[in-house]
Amino acid sequence: IGNIVPAYGEMLGGVSSAIEYAVSALKVSHIIVCGHSNCGAMKALLDPDPTNLNKMPTVASWLRNAEAARAVLEASDAGPATVRSLAEQNVQLQIAHLRTHPAVAAGLARGTLTLQGWFYDIASGEVVVLDETSRQFVHVDEAIARLRAQSGTPATA
Protein backbone atom coordinates (compact mmCIF):
# COMPACT_ATOMS: atom_id res chain seq x y z
CA ILE A 1 0.00 0.00 0.00
CA GLY A 2 1.40 3.38 -1.01
CA ASN A 3 4.77 2.04 -2.26
CA ILE A 4 5.87 2.26 1.37
CA VAL A 5 9.13 0.76 2.61
CA PRO A 6 9.61 1.11 6.36
CA ALA A 7 13.10 2.12 7.44
CA TYR A 8 15.14 -0.87 8.58
CA GLY A 9 14.43 -1.89 12.15
CA GLU A 10 11.07 -0.14 12.41
CA MET A 11 8.92 -2.99 11.14
CA LEU A 12 10.99 -6.08 10.52
CA GLY A 13 8.94 -8.63 8.66
CA GLY A 14 7.62 -9.20 5.17
CA VAL A 15 8.97 -6.08 3.49
CA SER A 16 12.42 -6.26 5.11
CA SER A 17 12.66 -9.98 4.38
CA ALA A 18 11.65 -9.50 0.75
CA ILE A 19 14.24 -6.75 0.26
CA GLU A 20 16.99 -8.77 1.91
CA TYR A 21 16.17 -11.91 -0.08
CA ALA A 22 15.87 -10.04 -3.38
CA VAL A 23 19.21 -8.27 -2.99
CA SER A 24 21.24 -10.97 -1.22
CA ALA A 25 19.90 -14.22 -2.67
CA LEU A 26 18.40 -13.24 -6.01
CA LYS A 27 21.09 -10.63 -6.72
CA VAL A 28 18.56 -8.01 -7.84
CA SER A 29 20.62 -5.16 -9.26
CA HIS A 30 18.00 -2.44 -9.67
CA ILE A 31 15.13 -1.42 -7.38
CA ILE A 32 12.49 1.04 -8.55
CA VAL A 33 10.09 2.82 -6.21
CA CYS A 34 7.16 3.86 -8.40
CA GLY A 35 4.48 6.22 -7.17
CA HIS A 36 1.37 6.86 -9.22
CA SER A 37 -1.43 9.33 -9.73
CA ASN A 38 -4.64 8.99 -7.72
CA CYS A 39 -2.86 6.96 -5.04
CA GLY A 40 -5.34 6.10 -2.30
CA ALA A 41 -2.64 5.99 0.36
CA MET A 42 -1.46 9.50 -0.49
CA LYS A 43 -5.08 10.71 -0.53
CA ALA A 44 -5.50 9.28 2.97
CA LEU A 45 -2.36 11.09 4.15
CA LEU A 46 -3.50 14.41 2.67
CA ASP A 47 -7.03 14.21 3.99
CA PRO A 48 -7.28 11.53 6.69
CA ASP A 49 -10.74 10.16 7.42
CA PRO A 50 -10.56 9.08 11.07
CA THR A 51 -13.76 7.06 10.74
CA ASN A 52 -12.29 4.88 7.99
CA LEU A 53 -8.81 4.70 9.51
CA ASN A 54 -10.22 3.70 12.91
CA LYS A 55 -11.76 0.68 11.19
CA MET A 56 -8.36 -0.19 9.70
CA PRO A 57 -5.76 0.26 12.46
CA THR A 58 -3.11 -1.76 10.62
CA VAL A 59 -3.48 0.42 7.52
CA ALA A 60 -3.34 3.55 9.69
CA SER A 61 -0.14 2.28 11.30
CA TRP A 62 1.35 1.44 7.90
CA LEU A 63 0.62 4.92 6.53
CA ARG A 64 2.67 6.47 9.34
CA ASN A 65 5.73 5.29 7.40
CA ALA A 66 4.96 8.01 4.85
CA GLU A 67 4.14 10.84 7.28
CA ALA A 68 7.56 12.45 6.78
CA ALA A 69 6.72 13.03 3.11
CA ARG A 70 3.71 15.10 4.11
CA ALA A 71 5.75 16.97 6.72
CA VAL A 72 8.37 17.91 4.12
CA LEU A 73 5.70 19.26 1.77
CA GLU A 74 4.02 21.22 4.55
CA ALA A 75 7.36 22.79 5.52
CA SER A 76 8.24 23.75 1.94
CA ASP A 77 7.09 26.79 0.02
CA ALA A 78 5.77 24.64 -2.83
CA GLY A 79 2.18 25.70 -2.28
CA PRO A 80 -0.69 23.43 -1.28
CA ALA A 81 0.11 19.73 -1.35
CA THR A 82 -1.55 17.64 -4.03
CA VAL A 83 -1.78 13.88 -4.31
CA ARG A 84 0.88 14.02 -7.03
CA SER A 85 3.29 16.23 -5.08
CA LEU A 86 2.87 14.02 -2.01
CA ALA A 87 3.34 10.84 -4.05
CA GLU A 88 6.54 12.26 -5.59
CA GLN A 89 7.86 13.29 -2.16
CA ASN A 90 6.93 9.85 -0.85
CA VAL A 91 8.99 8.18 -3.59
CA GLN A 92 12.02 10.14 -2.38
CA LEU A 93 11.31 9.21 1.25
CA GLN A 94 10.94 5.51 0.48
CA ILE A 95 14.24 5.50 -1.43
CA ALA A 96 15.83 6.98 1.69
CA HIS A 97 14.20 4.22 3.74
CA LEU A 98 15.54 1.57 1.35
CA ARG A 99 19.06 2.90 1.92
CA THR A 100 18.73 2.00 5.64
CA HIS A 101 18.40 -1.72 4.89
CA PRO A 102 21.77 -3.46 5.37
CA ALA A 103 21.53 -5.54 2.18
CA VAL A 104 20.69 -2.43 0.15
CA ALA A 105 23.44 -0.35 1.77
CA ALA A 106 25.95 -3.12 1.03
CA GLY A 107 24.81 -3.46 -2.59
CA LEU A 108 25.05 0.29 -3.11
CA ALA A 109 28.53 0.36 -1.55
CA ARG A 110 29.71 -2.50 -3.80
CA GLY A 111 28.18 -0.85 -6.86
CA THR A 112 26.04 -3.92 -7.58
CA LEU A 113 22.74 -2.21 -6.83
CA THR A 114 21.03 0.97 -7.99
CA LEU A 115 17.88 2.64 -6.74
CA GLN A 116 15.55 4.69 -8.87
CA GLY A 117 12.37 6.66 -8.22
CA TRP A 118 9.57 6.89 -10.75
CA PHE A 119 6.15 8.51 -10.89
CA TYR A 120 3.50 7.12 -13.24
CA ASP A 121 0.59 9.27 -14.39
CA ILE A 122 -2.21 6.79 -15.00
CA ALA A 123 -4.31 9.11 -17.18
CA SER A 124 -1.53 10.11 -19.60
CA GLY A 125 0.69 7.04 -19.35
CA GLU A 126 3.66 9.33 -18.71
CA VAL A 127 6.53 8.14 -16.52
CA VAL A 128 8.86 10.65 -14.92
CA VAL A 129 12.11 9.69 -13.22
CA LEU A 130 13.69 11.14 -10.10
CA ASP A 131 16.95 12.93 -10.85
CA GLU A 132 18.94 12.31 -7.66
CA THR A 133 21.11 15.38 -8.18
CA SER A 134 18.35 17.96 -8.63
CA ARG A 135 15.76 16.03 -6.56
CA GLN A 136 13.31 16.78 -9.39
CA PHE A 137 11.29 14.40 -11.53
CA VAL A 138 12.23 14.58 -15.21
CA HIS A 139 10.79 12.99 -18.35
CA VAL A 140 12.14 9.49 -18.92
CA ASP A 141 13.93 10.55 -22.16
CA GLU A 142 15.80 13.26 -20.27
CA ALA A 143 16.71 10.81 -17.51
CA ILE A 144 18.13 8.35 -20.06
CA ALA A 145 20.15 11.11 -21.73
CA ARG A 146 21.57 12.18 -18.36
CA LEU A 147 22.52 8.61 -17.45
CA ARG A 148 24.23 8.12 -20.80
CA ALA A 149 26.15 11.37 -20.37
CA GLN A 150 27.26 10.35 -16.86
CA SER A 151 28.42 6.93 -18.01
CA GLY A 152 30.01 8.14 -21.23
CA THR A 153 27.69 5.95 -23.29
CA PRO A 154 26.91 7.50 -26.68
CA ALA A 155 23.28 8.02 -27.65
CA THR A 156 22.05 5.43 -30.13
CA ALA A 157 21.06 6.58 -33.58
Image (cartoon, helix red, strand yellow):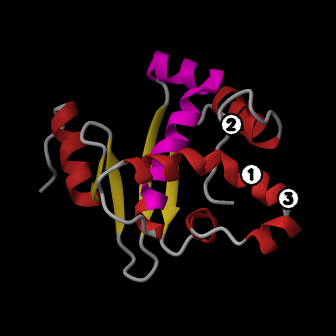
Q: Secondary structure at mark 1?
A: helix
In-front residue for pair 97/145: 97
Residue at (46%, 77%) from the top-left corner? 122
Asked if residue 75 can be seen in this view, the reply is yes
3D distance between C-alphas at marks 2 and 1: 17 Å
Q: Please identify the quarter of the rendering in which residue 10 is found.
A: top right
**Label 2 close to label 1 by CB (< 8 Å):** no
Q: Which residue is mark 1?
A: 62
Residue 78 location, x and y as percent?
30, 57
Residue 80 location, x and y as percent?
37, 66
Answer with mark 3 or mark 2, whichever residue precedes in sequence.
Answer: 2
Q: Nearer the viewer, mark 1 or mark 3?
A: 3
Which region is colored magenta? Answer: 86-111
3D distance between C-alphas at marks 3 and 2: 24 Å
Residue at (83%, 37%) from the top-left corner? 13
Q: Nearer the viewer, mark 3 or mark 2?
A: 3
Task: Give the amino acid at mark 3.
Answer: Pro
Q: Secondary structure at mark 3?
A: helix
Residue at (58%, 70%) from the top-left corner? 43
| 12 sits to left or right of 97 | right
Answer with mark 1 or mark 3, whichever residue precedes in sequence.
Answer: 3
**Label 1 close to label 3 by CB (< 8 Å):** no
Q: Secondary structure at mark 2?
A: helix
Q: Which residue is mark 3?
A: 57
Residue at (47%, 59%) from the top-left corner? 86
Asked if residue 31 can be seen in this view, the reply is no
Task: Give the amino acid at mark 2.
Answer: Ile
| 102 sits to left or right of 79 | right
Q: Which residue is mark 2?
A: 19
For the N terminus, which image quadrant?
A: bottom right
Task: Give the amino acid at mark 1.
Answer: Trp
